């Protein structure tokens, strides 16, 4: 039996396990896939292990729903940050650090909202129809006129598996300007292989791409299928630093499951 916790950030939901005693077999991707299964397991867009770190508050290990350890997940990072605060692992909720696959992250927690500092972005591929950038995970960003009419699953899957992004593929975001610095984003996530209700690294990539179209804005309010998020940053000649992803991170339930 192992204890687990379920968290969600703007509808992006995760199974979280406190693995500081290293009792969970992180190499068993079949088990992780089963735990993320919404019919035969707990259900989630991914699974995270919270582990010890010699200098920072903790280490985050993220696994996609397919069971394989993955690149950075922004909403996952916000959820595991909230979990660490709730468990008393973090002593200073207004300023703490953790290690993830893409490096060190700073975070703060207050009243159910987590503000997470993301990695700097200094390489962007700009095409007439889209942009491509890595915000901890790779993202293709495409602007559309009617996001509510966009076939996110079919178009996203085709781009994710296209020869252009072979062999590893990419996450795919569709973005519509709603007004000024307000955008709406829908995302097809690699590893989940479906549209998710939110994607943290995806909205960061979308906000940066939106800035390229409207350089006067360095903060964006973002509507996703599962709620609302905010992204802010500093920029200089397509070099993006001090990038922050802000939004809710909520405890859903806890339980025990037999492995």
Image (tube, rainbow, N blue to C red):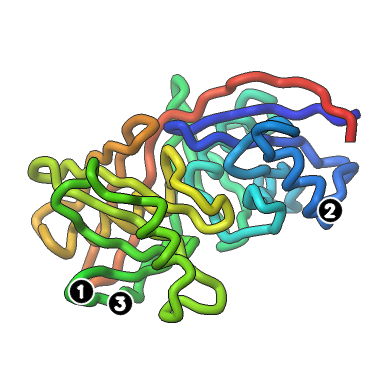
Residue 190 picture location, percent across and down: 52, 58
Label 3 to label 1: alpha-carbon separation: 14 Å
Q: Nearer the viewer, mark 3 or mark 1?
A: 3
Q: Is residue 248 visible?
A: yes
Which of 131/90 is in front? 131
- Discs 3, 2 touching: Cβ within 8 Å: no
Q: Which mark identifies residue 237?
A: 1
Residue mark closest to the camera, 3 vs 2: 2
Which quadrant of the view contains residue 38?
A: top right
Image label count: 3
Q: x and y percent of residue 214 in the render?
A: 10, 58
127 relative position to 134: left or right? left
Kindly check if marks 3 and 1 are in contact, taking CB atoms under 8 A apart as contact: no
| Marks 2, 1: nearer the viewer | 2
The x, y position of residue 252, in whole percent, is 59, 21
Asked if residue 242 shows in the view, the reply is no
Report the disc number at residue 163: none
The residues bearing labels 3 and 2 have C-alpha atoms spaced at a distance of 36 Å
Examine the rendered structure and indicate whether residue 37 appears above or below residue 205. above
Q: Is residue 216 above or below residue 22?
A: below
Residue 114 to residue 122: above or below: above
Vertical placement of residue 89 versus 143, above or below: above
What residue would you read off at disc 2? 28
Residue under numbered circle 3: 125
């Amino acid at each position: 039996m192992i204890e687990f916790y379920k968290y969600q950030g703007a509808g992006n939901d995760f199974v979280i396990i406190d693995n500081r005693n290293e009792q969970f077999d992180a190499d068993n991707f079949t088990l992780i896939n089963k735990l993320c299964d919404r019919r035969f397991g707990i259900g989630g867009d991914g699974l995270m292990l919270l582990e010890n770190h010699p200098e920072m508050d903790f280490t985050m290990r993220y696994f996609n729903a397919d069971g394989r350890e993955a690149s950075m997940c922004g909403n996952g990072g916000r959820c595991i940050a909230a979990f660490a605060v709730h468990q008393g692992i973090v002593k200073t909720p207004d300023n703490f650090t953790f290690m993830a696959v893409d490096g060190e992250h700073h975070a703060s927690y207050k009243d159910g909202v987590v503000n997470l500092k993301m990695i700097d972005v200094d390489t962007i591929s700009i095409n007439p129809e889209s942009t491509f950038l890595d915000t901890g995970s790779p993202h293709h960003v495409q602007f559309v006129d009617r996001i509510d009419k966009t076939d996110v699953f079919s178009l996203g899957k085709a781009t994710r598996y296209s020869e252009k992004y072979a062999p590893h593929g990419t996450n795919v975001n569709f973005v519509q300007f709603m007004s000024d610095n307000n955008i709406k984003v829908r995302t097809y996530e690699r590893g989940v292989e479906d549209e998710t209700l939110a994607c943290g690294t995806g909205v960061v990539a979308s906000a940066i791409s939106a800035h390229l179209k409207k350089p006067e804005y360095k903060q964006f309010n973002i509507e996703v299928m599962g709620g609302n998020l905010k992204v802010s940053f500093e920029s200089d000649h397509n070099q993006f630093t001090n990038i922050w992803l802000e939004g809710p991170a909520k405890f859903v339930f806890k339980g025990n499951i037999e492995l």
